[in-house]
Image (cartoon, rainbow, N blue to C red):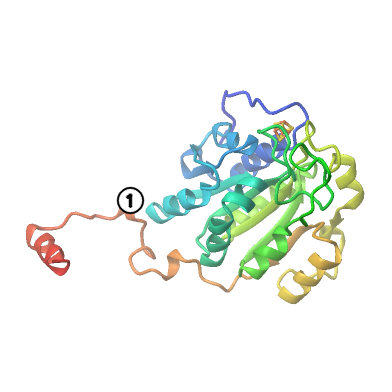
Amino acid sequence: KDFRNKVKPNWCPGCGDFSIQAAIQRAAANVGLEPEDLAVVSGIGCSGRISGYINAYGFHGIHGRALPIAQGLKMANRELTVIASGGDGDGFAIGMGHTIHAIRRNINITYIVMDNQIYGLTKGQTSPRSAFGFKTKSTPAGSIESALSPLEMALAAGASFVAQSFSSNLKQLTSLIEEGMKHEGFSFINVFSPCVTFNKINTYDWFKENIVDLDESSDYDPSNRVMAMSKIMETNSLACGLIYQDKSRPSYENQVKGFREQGLALQDLTITEDEFNKLVAEFR
Ligand code: SF4
């Protein structure tokens, strides 16, 4: 079960994305998958390269569209474990419509956002996750927009699994990805992944000083949605760990007749000429 391949990542040395790649590879091995059981779908951006760096089915999609592809894959073949991944610009700007609807739809896939709070591939512009006042080439006088809170958004959209981690905490991140893969429904995992080249504010040291690790809090209850929202607001969205999980909600595909048993790709879709003519007649 080796999820490493021979492709050498061309991320900048020190980029947080390396650890996310390693965490996915470890989590997949830990839950007992074989490479042919896993599909990794990505969007565009530095993060988008990840689908080429894992020994599994890989699909490098277009900007903001990793989730529609990943959901389609899962519906076509529910035997596959499907991971969608992308940056904060990819998922929270151009892809935000897909993100919200995928969350509330609850298809059984894991979405990992590689959140570096900037656009890295295009050389450092303000993203939906950049803080108010953040100075980049696109906002030289400082951003006058406030940053999006992915955790608040996910919870408000009706997520059944919300987690957050930091790329430096490989143990926690791997464990959360494993839990996300095992969760019956859509799992949303936001990961702080420092861009060492362009984001000089949200650095490794900055996160180490500001993150609130829920694994160190014995009285936190991730099944309590109200507590989850309070914790997110209280920590200014810097809480890390399993934020919320609802194990009772059925996944989308488990509610659709036909898909409950088998994905489309594995079903016998041959029909007789009579059946075909009847079907066509319905649409005349
Ligand atoms: Fe990582 Fe930033 Fe380099 Fe992109 S530009 S590879 S996000 S460090």
- Residue drawn at point x = 61 percent, y = 68 percent: 157
Instruction: Tell me, yes or no, if residue 223 can be seen here.
Output: yes
Instruction: Tell me, yes or no, if residue 184 can be seen here.
Output: no
Work out whether 50 lies above or below 263: above
| Residue in the foreground of this view, choosing between 31 and 278 | 278
Residue 170 image position (x, y, % from top left)? 76, 43
- Residue drawn at point x = 86 percent, y = 41 percent: 201
Residue 184 image position (x, y, % from top left)? 55, 63
Residue 166 image position (x, y, % from top left)? 78, 47
Tell me if 12 is positioned left or right of 94 in this view.
right
Tell me if 174 is positioned left or right of 86 in this view.
right
| Residue in the foreground of this view, choosing between 102 and 133 | 133
Task: Count the numbered circles shown.
Answer: 1
Residue 179 image position (x, y, % from top left)? 64, 56
Q: Label 1 belongs to which residue? A: 265
Q: Quadrant of ligand 1?
A: top right
Work out whether 183 lies above or below 121: below
